[in-house]
């Protein structure tokens, strides 16, 4: 069973880093803007965790996709420039981490345009990939993305390999699907400022879940899309687990690590 990929490729791994910083917690609880402790936990992402993540990827010659809210890009422009200079994909992730399903009227279109303008100002390139904050698309989202020339969305959960989605008026977008089981946020949620006080999983437990998913996805020859937040997965113990996971996956034959935009473009050309 060769799977869905051309040539010898057996499985494509897409590492996606959602560089939320404190934006998602501020969106959820605006008081966090005035709570230095909670805010600093988010700020650890773009300031301390990100350089460590970039070093890890550089050591292994892996290119990844980074989904960055405009609000974060405005506050840490150097981080965006560093990610871009290293050859990673810079993709859209809202302005202040607004789930599209919570936006009304023109707000969703305005957030899309504002986010794109900020990222383009820093990189010289318009983002062509989009991941909705909290994976909550609105019924209008795919149409709005197609209007703006986006190549792919990464918010849906309908498969474990890329697929095409209808974006209205005969247009289609590539979907790079995700799932909560391959996201760090559900496992390490402790954050009293946003009401998350469940017990955190240990990195070893998360490794078991993520690696067993990889083994099956590899066996079936599909796509392994992992969603990571620097402020969450960049913490000690968790980042070394991610390193161990990457190294374990690289021991398998014909595993290709790729940016979501490159996979989406190739998939669109073939579809
Ligand atoms: Zn996010």
Image (cartoon, rainbow, N blue to C red):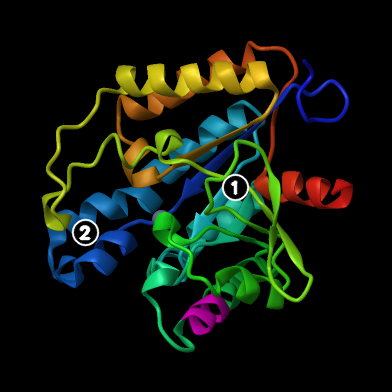
SS label for mark 1: strand
Q: Earlier in the sequence, mark 1 or mark 2?
A: 2
The answer for how far apart the CA atoms under marks 1 and 2 are is 24 Å
* Quadrant where the N terminus is found in the figure: top right
| Residue 87 visible, this angle | no
The residue identified by callout 1 is 65
| Rendered location of residue 10, percent (x, y) | 74, 21
Specify whether residue 257 is in view: yes
Q: Is residue 12 magenta?
A: no
Q: Measured along the vertical axis of the image, is residue 127 above or below residue 121?
A: above
- Pick the front one: 7 or 250: 7
Magenta part of the protein: which range? 108-114
Q: Is residue 236 above or below residue 168?
A: above
Residue contact at pointers 1 and 2, CB within 8 angstroms: no
Q: Which image quadrant is residue 166 in? A: bottom right
Q: Is mark 1 within 8 Å of ligand 1?
A: no
Q: Quadrant of residue 146?
A: bottom right
How many badges with numbers are in the image? 2
Q: Nearer the viewer, mark 1 or mark 2?
A: 1
Q: Position of residue 246 (x, y in %)?
A: 54, 22
Please report the residue visible at 32 percent of the width from the left and 61 percent of the height from the top.
24
Whole-percent x, y for residue 123 in the image: 64, 66
**Which image quadrant shows ligand 1?**
bottom left
**Mark 2 packing: few (<14 Cα in 10 Å), some, or many (20+)?**
some
- Would you name the residue on which mark 2 appears? 39
């Amino acid at each position: 069973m060769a799977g869905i990929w051309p040539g010898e490729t057996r499985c494509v791994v897409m590492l996606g880093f959602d560089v939320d910083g404190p934006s998602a917690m501020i969106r959820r609880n605006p008081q966090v803007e005035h709570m230095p402790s909670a805010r600093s936990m988010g700020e650890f992402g773009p300031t301390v965790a990100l350089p460590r993540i970039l070093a890890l990827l550089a050591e292994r010659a892996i290119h990844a996709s980074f989904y960055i809210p405009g609000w974060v890009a405005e506050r840490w422009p150097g981080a965006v420039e560093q990610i871009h200079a290293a050859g990673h994909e810079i993709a859209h992730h809202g302005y202040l981490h607004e789930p599209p399903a919570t936006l009304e009227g023109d707000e969703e279109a305005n957030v899309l345009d504002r986010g794109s303008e900020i990222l383009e100002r820093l990189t010289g390139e318009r983002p062509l990939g989009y991941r909705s904050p909290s994976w909550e698309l609105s019924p209008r989202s795919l149409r709005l993305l197609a209007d703006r020339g986006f190549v792919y969305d990464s918010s849906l959960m309908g498969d474990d390999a890329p697929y095409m989605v209808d974006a209205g008026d005969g247009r289609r977008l590539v979907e790079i699907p995700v799932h909560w089981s391959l996201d760090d946020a559900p496992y390490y949620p402790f954050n009293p400022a946003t009401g998350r006080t469940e017990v955190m999983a240990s990195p070893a437990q998360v490794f078991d879940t993520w690696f067993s998913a990889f083994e099956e996805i590899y066996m079936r020859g599909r796509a392994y899309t992992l969603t990571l937040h620097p402020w969450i997965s960049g913490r000690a113990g968790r980042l070394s687990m991610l390193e161990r996971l990457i190294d374990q996956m690289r021991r398998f034959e014909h595993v290709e690590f790729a940016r979501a935009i490159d996979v989406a473009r190739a998939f669109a050309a073939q579809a």
